[in-house]
Image: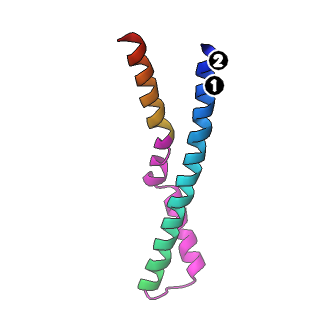
Amino acid sequence: MVFAVARLALMGFVVLGIIYVLVSIYSRSVRTERLEKRWEEEGRPGDRDTYVQEGLAEYDGSVRRKLILGVFVVPVIVVGSLIYAINFF
């Protein structure tokens, strides 16, 4: 039984890791597009690449980026709760 739980945990973290990377890449690309649009709407102040890089630096420290880590936390809590409920109720 211990091996089954370990195998489930390993496969789960691999799958969740892949999902995390994909969501992170998607979110960063959406943020980049918004920054490029905002740069054009503001009348093209300065260099576009510098403007986008500064905006992405702010994004890296934002709460939204940290919320993406919920990809790991929420499924683990749900699966753990289901396993507990099935076995002990």
- Which quadrant of the figure has residue 49? bottom right
Q: Which residue in the protein does label 1 denote?
A: 7
Q: Nearer the viewer, residue 44 or 27?
A: 27
Residue at left 58%, top 83%?
A: 47
In the image, is residue 49 above or below residue 21?
below
- Quarter of the figure that contains the C terminus: top left
Q: Main secondary structure of the magenta part?
A: helix
Q: Residues within 10 Å of mark 2 (few under 14, many from 20)?
A: few
The residues colored magenta run 42-71
Residue at 55%, 47% in the rendered image: 20
Instruction: Look at label 1 and name its amino acid.
Output: Arg
Towards the viewer: 33 or 15: 15
Real-space Cα separation, disc 2 to disc 1, in angstroms: 6 Å
User: Badge 2 is on which residue?
Assistant: 3
Is residue 75 shown left or right of residue 4?
left
Note whether 56 is above or below 89 in the view shown.
below
Tell me what residue is drawn at x 62 percent, y 38 percent: 14
